[in-house]
Image (spheres, rainbow, N blue to C red):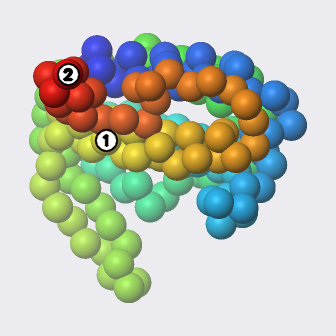
Amino acid sequence: MFKSSQQTLEEFKVVLLQLPKDCYSKPCETLSQATIGQHTRHIIELYQCLLSGFEFDEVCYDKRKRDKRIETDVDFAIYHLGQIQQLLEKPDKKLTMVYELNGNREEMESNYFREVMYNLEHTIHHQALIKVGINQLTHVMLPDSFGVAPSTIQYREQAV
């Protein structure tokens, strides 16, 4: 799980480094005018919520910073992806997930390993959207695995 997460984030960094500078924060029509940078920030900030909440046994994905610098400065985003890679591997423990729904605080039990897996799947989902944006805005060739779940890759390999 940690290895897959770290590999996915590493591949993400490599892809971001290939982008023309002007496309990272350029609105993309097929993404409802969202940017690759906004999707990247969203990925990073969910991991940051998990890592900062680990210490207090409580995670709230709703209380993200929404740091504009992450969504406009690709080098800053890559730095934060590297930080996540370094800090991600931790022991499993119970966590309380907190959600703000219709003005009410809701809580749910989870654990660190489950939330790492959630973040991995969430990252892959957003990478699939980012792939759409990259394909619209650039001619960058992406790895076949970018934005594809590991189980899908395994299935495709077995089907050959």
Rendering quarter of residue 124: top left
The structure residue drawn at horizontal position 43% and vertical position 36%, both measured from the top left corner, is 147
Quadrant housing the N terminus? top left
The disc label shown at residue 121, or none: 1
Q: Position of residue 41 (x, y in %)?
A: 60, 43
- Visible residue check, residue 47: no
- Nearer the observer, disc 1 or disc 2? 2
| Residue that sits furthest to the front in the current view | 160
Q: Where is residue 82 in the image (x, y as percent from the top left)?
A: 54, 18
Residue 160 is labelled as: 2
Question: Is residue 70 found left or right of 129 in the rendered image?
Answer: right
Q: Nearer the viewer, residue 118 or 132?
A: 132
Relative to residue 5, is residue 136 depicted above or below? below
Tell me what residue is drawn at x 29 percent, y 61 percent: 98
What amino acid type should be assigned to the residue bearing mark 1?
A: Glu
**The quadrant where residue 117 appears:** top left
Secondary element under disc 1, as helix, strand or loop, is helix
Q: Which residue lies furthest to the bottom in this view?
A: 102
* Dot 1 crowding, Cα within 10 Å, few <14, some 14–19, many 20+: some
Q: Residues within 10 Å of mark 2 (few under 14, many from 20)?
A: few
